[in-house]
Amino acid sequence: MTAETTSSRAQSPVIVTRDGATATLTLNRPSRKNAIDDEGWHLLRAALEDLATDDAVRAVIVTGAGGDFCAGADLGRPSGDEHPAARMRRVGNIAIALSELPKPVIAKVEGVAAGAGWNLALACDLVVASTSARFSQIFARRGLSIDFGGSWFLPRLVGMQQAKRLAMLAEMISAEEARELGLVTWVRPEDEVADFVAELAHRLAALPPVALAQSKALLHQGATQTLREAIDNESRAQAVNLATEDAPAAFRAFREKAEPPAYTGRWALR
């Protein structure tokens, strides 16, 4: 990699790096607390599309540079002549792409996560926050209503009354309170967050990819389905799992009391 390429990459508002089967997606505008401008939204969508189809990537970490996660959309930058409704649909589609990414996604949150930045974390599957992290659905303070999927995520995670409190008062809450509300999975000291997230991603990347992708989709779908619909979907998903090399290999390891196999996700019926 040339010095020019390295410098250009360092200036990009979204950086994707790889470490084995783990990809880390870093929002990279630390001078703006990683607030996302139009270029950043475009690059974020492109990165998610690439990660969704890259079979070498088995787990994804989303984080921010410079000690903050994301202060939301950059309201200080002009957005051109695009109609606001069209822009919001385009940005909202990124929330859908992240939530539906067919691999486990960990939000590593340090510093501020506000507005769409907090909802970016909620669109991930697991959230690890440092003790110094702070969160706000800041929209009301900017004369705006909640967006980037917050109206969908919050009531399902905390119930309607707490969702209304967070959206209407736009309070800044601590990482520990966010964890107590069920909006953060783990809180760790600042000097432990990086290692904890890396180990968590490593564990997820070692699990059967097809089974994990299906469990993620089933949980999302099950939230709005009847029990009968959910069970029908589970039955179809298990048939897919049994047609991969992973389920039979796991069964053999269980019967033989052996170490778990190296899961590949490969299709066994050829």
Image: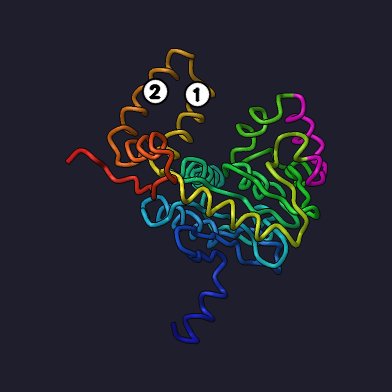
- Nearest the camera: 212 or 76? 212
Q: Are marks 2 and 1 in contact (CB under 8 Å)?
A: yes
The residue under the point 60% across, 61% down is: 27
Farthest-out residue, left: 270
* Rendered position, 119 above or below 236: below
Question: Can residue 243 be found in the magenta stretch?
Answer: no
Farthest-out residue, bottom: 3
* Rendered position, 115 above or below 192: above
Circle nearer the N terminus (2, 1): 1
Residue 209 position in % (x across, y down): 41, 44
What residue is disc 2 on? 233
- Which amino acid type corresponds to the residue marked 2 in the rendered image? Asn
Residue 169 position in % (x across, y down): 82, 36
The residue under the point 56% across, 75% down is: 10
Q: Which mark is residue 9?
A: none
Magenta residue span: 161-177
Residue 202 position in % (x across, y down): 53, 54
* Rendered position, 34 above or below 249: below
Q: Secondary structure at mark 1?
A: helix
Number of residues whose C-alpha sits closer than 10 Å to that of mark 2, classed few (under 14), some (14–19) or many (20 or more) = some
- Which amino acid type corresponds to the residue marked 1 in the rendered image? Gly
The residue under the point 67% across, 49% down is: 128
Q: Secondary structure at mark 2?
A: helix
- Nearest the camera: 110 or 268? 268
Farthest-out residue, front: 256
* Rendered position, 116 above or below 50: above
Residue 219 position in % (x across, y down): 51, 29
Instruction: Give the CA separation, mark 2 to mark 1.
Output: 9 Å
What residue is disc 1 on? 222
